[in-house]
Image: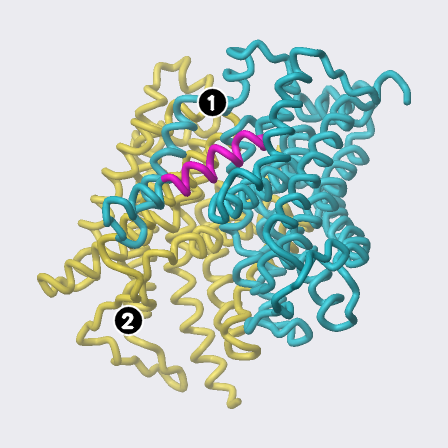
Chain colours: A cyan, B yellow
Amino acid sequence: VTGRWRLDLLPRNAVPLAVLLVAFLIAPWIVDDYLLTVLILALYYAFTGQAWNIMMGFAGQLSLGHALYVGLGSYVAATLFTRFGIGPWLGLLAAIPVAAACGAIVGYLAFRFGVAGVYFAILTIAFAEFARIGFDHLDYVNASSGLFLPVKQYAHNDPWLLRGDPTMFYYVILAATVVAFVLCHLLLRSRVGYFWLAIREDEQAARAAGIDTFRYKMYAVTISAAVTSFAGVFYAFYYNNLFPEQVFSISRSIEIMLGPIIGGVGTLFGPILGAFVLTTLSEALNSVMSAFGFDLPGATQVFYGICLLLVVVALPHGVWPPLARRLGLTWSGK
Amino acid sequence: VPFDVYLNVAVGGVLTGLVYGLMALGLSVIFGVVRVVNFAHGEMMTIAMYIAIVMFAWFHLDPLVLLVPIAAVLFVFGYALQAALINPFITRPEHSQFLLLVALAIIIANTLMIIFGPDARTVQTSYAFDSFQIGAVIVDAAKVYAGAAAIAFTVALFAFFRFSLLGKAIRACADNYTGALVVGLDVKRLYALTFGLGAACVGAAGTMLVLIVDATPMVGPSYTLLAFVIVITGGLGSMPGALVGGVLIGLTEALAGLLFTPSAKSMFAFAILVLVLLFRPQGILGRRLS
């Protein structure tokens, strides 16, 4: 372990982090079934947000189509499971290269032909939409009628096949989120990470300084896509059904981005905080609405939109950077 | 399939494409000047569509009569939006602007959902089933009116930007922001005016589109995407480009719907987008990217 790969666990960062981790580890014994599903959802978005943040937050490449990699991961793993009986962890070994290759194709086409900025963002949407409509007509995966994983009552949890109760899924996604956090931390402290930040801040200057910007942008897209594909595998086995209209939809891509943008783009802890803020907000709005017997379709979403608007107007850098400063933490990742 | 069926579908596609082009022109004008991508573009169009539907249901006002009034309403909406919310965001990073406009899109779509419910709505004009026949070509009257109105509106906008002093001032802002400030132009107000004009385009397009398609509150994102595709294909910032892109995409979608399956038609639009981005990133009629 060389110096730059060491986790800089200063005591004032490590203590709150350890407390948080212990809280998450004992949470299933404390919360009820409903809250557990909310926590799973929040951790899911914390994971995907971190994966997206590698590309946008670190390397400055705005992807508006990350649902593509979730969808590919979920379809590869679910197809291998339903057709050949291959379990999700082996499926993941197939999903990662597929998603990474797809990310590499998008990245190669864009960066080689000088597609950047807003154009690049729209290219990523185009690929995700292309996949959505394509899978909608692909009979091998049941096209628009959807792919279903067999569901039955399980006597005991089977982590190897990802069949079991929500508590097992909770620990799987918690572990994934922690792994992603450590990975992001290590990446950001690595040579690649510093090059990414240089590209994000000023690509021309980075190139002038001798950084092969094409190569490092390719690393960002590929790594981000590969990490995201795990979320797809998890999604397939947790929800047990897949519809191209849903997994590849532009709304899924937007949901992936909201967490890190609200939490703080480019920070390590921002995507996690943002995911919890948004999931809590959405669930709280739902319960407040139903408590008042107010069940107009869309009303919750309107308040959700207003909250997003207020946060983005009031906190240009997201929730985490000002909060970290207030708490005296140095772990902002900047 | 006989040849004249292709011809009829192609003409219909071109006419629909003109309306798409007008919608995309709004996006192009806003991006070209304000440099903000309007991610709530489709939602702004659904506002116009629902105004047209309500006016028709209550007062039996034909969408063709409502073209200018609805465009004016959307102009005011766009002006207020830019002046109040978006102007402070013009120097912020893209993802920040993106979130602002997505939040706005969520609010608009779901407000429409609360008011009108999720069902598709439409207007039944007296000429809904009329058609014109020119030689072998038979084409819906509604599409002809919509296409003609789209052309008229576009020509008026061209004239405004080309000849009026205000239009020239807006183009000056787009060409050189600092220069515009130096010569004393009120850039913030011109930005608001531009966003208003872009909104007016999408308002006019939405009013015409209710003659051709149904409206649902959640239809916005697909039109936002369509506008992106058209604008990039035609050339971002090029006004004739938006119209050419619209016609091209309208034609492609119509023929793809006939040759393959209607549900796969947007796949061809996205394929065109990818090809254009790779081989002619400035778009068909766009200026070279700097």
Residue B156, percent from left and from top: 29, 47
Dividing the picture into quadrants, the one containing residue A139 is bottom right
Look at the picture and state if A323 lies above or below A229.
above
Letter of the chain that mark 1 sits on in the rendering: A
* One can see residue B268 in this view: no
Judge by depth and name the residue closer to the eye, B2 or A170.
Answer: A170
Residue B32 magenta-drawn? no
Q: Amino acid at mark 2?
A: Ala
At x 28% / y 63%, what residue is drawn?
A: B210
Q: Which residue is mark 1?
A: A316
Judge by depth and name the residue closer to the eye, A297 or A201.
Answer: A297
Left or right relative to A301: residue A237: right
Residue A105, percent from left and from top: 75, 50
Q: Which residues are magenta?
A: A271-284
Judge by depth and name the residue closer to the eye, A158 or B178.
Answer: A158
Residue at the limit of the structure toward the bottom, as seen here:
B2
At x 41% / y 13%, what residue is drawn?
A: B182
Q: Which residue is mark 2?
A: B142
Look at the picture and state if B173 lies above or below B203.
above
- Local packing at callout 2 (Cα closer than 10 Å; few below 14, some 14-19, many 20+) is many
Look at the picture and state if A35 lies above or below A198.
below
At x 21% / y 76%, what residue is drawn?
A: B127
The Cα–Cα distance between marks 2 and 1, rounded to whole angstroms, is 46 Å
At x 82% / y 20%, what residue is drawn?
A: A6
